[in-house]
Image: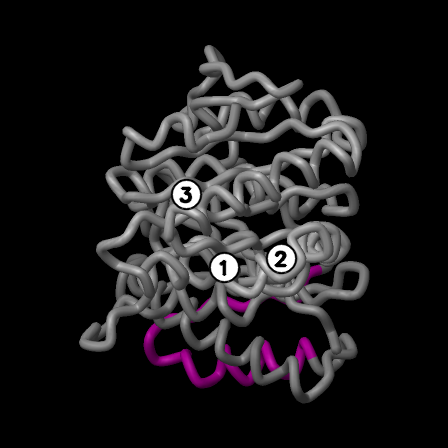
Amino acid sequence: MTPTDRCDESFVHPALLYRGDREYVETTTRFVAEGVAAGEPVAVAVPTRRLDLIRRALGPLGDDVRWIDMTRDGRNPGRIIPSVLRRFTDTHRGRRVRIIGEPVWRGRTAAEYPACLQHEALINRAFDGHDVTILCPYDARALSDEVIADAHATHPVVISGGQERVSPAFDPDAVLERCNETLCHPPGAATVRFDAAGLPAVRDFAAGAARERGMTPARLQDLSLVVAELTTNSVVHGGGSGTLRIWAESEQIVCEVQDAGRLNDPLAGRRPLRPEQIGGRGLFLVHVVSDLVRVHTGASGTTVRSCIARG
């Protein structure tokens, strides 16, 4: 059984729990071939090696498919909905669309995984009512039991061993609450308070701290954009002031902005920008240029953390 058996529903979001390359290729190529035969636009957004497996198996049939390397375009899970999935579906408005999207693979770091999990839970909100099927493969042999359990919690149906079943564990709202975890920072982080009058100074402070920690000029431009957007958001929406912290972590520079505001929209920054849109671009741009973004919000305020490779 494939997700096409549920095409009477507008939005279909199954998880595919595959065990080995053969099952992966057979199921994904059948999913793609059925879509092409039905005249549906099809995109495949999976890690590099998996992309090559499906492309080779499809042969000329793959000429009608949009191929996306998830290890590049989905490096930051917060970019996937607006810049991968919605970019493709919005190009084909008025038509049913199908996508293979694999955001979780062996090699994702412990820091990245909660953002992947949050992404999978948010897909259900972002595409509710849309005419789209998004098939999400999970390597049941390589991934932990906890990750597979999370796949059941974020997908209304699960395909395993050739059988599709409704997931009794499906509860994306509970997953989103779990992902809204407190973000702890190291005691040695470079720290500065700011308000509206101090915005230029805090941006200079961040650039200097990142430069001292080995960030290259090219990525320094990205960090400067992140700092400008987040600190401005704090002044405009977060009570007029905030705290910025910068530190080095492995090969990344981490920039964190904390303020007294509360972010009530979990899809903030994950919607594509409209050409006529004025304002509301800050978090979207932060997701675009960052390698990872984490957010915590609650009664005491909001923290947004951006991780950017040093070079």
The disc, 1 or 3, on the residue closer to the chain's N-terminal end is 1
Q: Nearer the viewer, mark 1 or mark 3?
A: 1
Give the residue at mark 3. 297
Q: Is residue 193 above or below residue 171?
A: below
The dominant secondary structure in magenta is helix
Q: Which residues are magenta?
A: 189-210
Q: Write the residue at 36% across / 51% down.
A: 260
Residue at the disc numbered 2: 70
Give x and y (percent) for residue 184: 62, 44
Q: Which residue is mark 1?
A: 79
Q: Nearer the viewer, residue 31 or 238?
A: 31
Q: Which mark is residue 228?
A: none
Task: Using residue 177 as the reference point, say whether residue 232 is left or right of it.
Answer: left
Q: Is residue 100 left or right of residue 20?
A: left
Q: CA distance from mark 1 to mark 2?
A: 10 Å
Above or below, comparing residue 135 to residue 212 in the picture = above
Disc 1 marks a residue whose amino acid type is: Arg
